[in-house]
Image (cartoon, grey):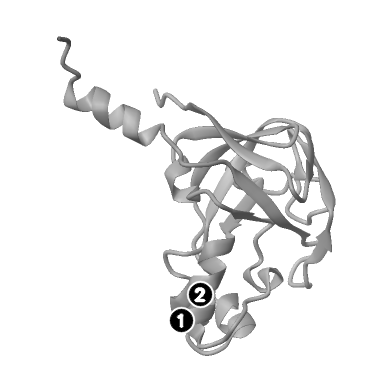
Amino acid sequence: MVQQSKSSIMSDLINKFAQKGVVQWIGLRPEKKQPLTSVKSVEVSLTKGLVGDHFAGTYSNKRQVTLIQAEHLQTVASLMGVNVIDPELTRRNIVVQGINLLALKEKQFKIGEVILETTGTCQPCSRMETNLGKGGYNAMRGHGGITAKVIQAGLIHIGDEVEVLATVIKS
């Protein structure tokens, strides 16, 4: 009988997901400090990120796309004492349901035709206090989602699955 090492067991656990996620909402920020525009699909560029988003091409590739879990929007709503949080208020680009985005650390994942790689967590900014109300900043802490860079360009549509592809080896 072959025994698995603890690191092999941990690696297996880290790479298992109960299900694929699903894109629930897509938003673009056409101009700085302006409301997001909800769209049904978005073109994603390798160099500019989301086409039509004001961040496109202006920052490092580490923050080309921001994603947040629908489940975290429910948590933030609960912490704010409201029924629903409009995803537009969080200033994130894509809302995903059914997969733990924080478990995508050091992983590549596919949404529609696009391949993304997690680059970090998306921390709340002071705008959350304005957008969500008193305590909005603290309600978003730990629930702000992730940032990602584009590995393969293409289109993302509402309803597309989020599928984990690989663990990224850091050198």
> Horizontal placement of 5 versus 18: left or right?
left
Q: Is residue 11 above or below residue 86?
A: above
Whether the residues at callouts 2 and 1 have beta carbons within 8 Å, the answer is: yes
Q: Which mark is residue 114?
A: none
Residue at 61%, 53% in the rendered image: 67
Circle 1: is it few (<14), some (14-19), or many (20+) Cα within 10 Å? some
In the image, 139 versus 51, the foreground residue is: 139
In the image, 131 versus 69, the foreground residue is: 69
The quadrant holding residue 35 is bottom right
Relative image position of residue 170 (x, y in whole percent): 41, 26
Instruction: Tell me the residue that label 2 is attached to.
Output: 76
Q: In this view, does 46 lie above or below 31?
A: above
Instruction: Tell me the residue that label 1 is attached to.
Output: 79
Q: Is residue 43 above or below residue 94?
A: above
Relative image position of residue 158 (x, y in whole percent): 77, 51
For mark 1, give the secondary structure. Answer: helix
Name the image quarter holding the N terminus. Answer: top left
Q: What residue type is labelled 1?
A: Leu
Q: In this view, does 58 lie above or below 29?
A: above
Circle 2: is it few (<14), some (14-19), or many (20+) Cα within 10 Å? many
Residue at 49%, 77% in the rendered image: 137
Please count the marks in the image: 2
Relative image position of residue 63 (x, y in whole percent): 61, 47
Relative image position of residue 145 (x, y in whole percent): 52, 57
Residue at 58%, 58% in the rendered image: 68
The quadrant holding residue 91 is bottom right
Q: Residue furthest front?
A: 1
Give the alpha-carbon distance from disc 2 to disc 1, as whole Å.
5 Å
For mark 2, give the secondary structure. Answer: helix
Q: Which amino acid does label 2 sit on?
A: Val
Name the image quarter holding the C terminus. Answer: top left
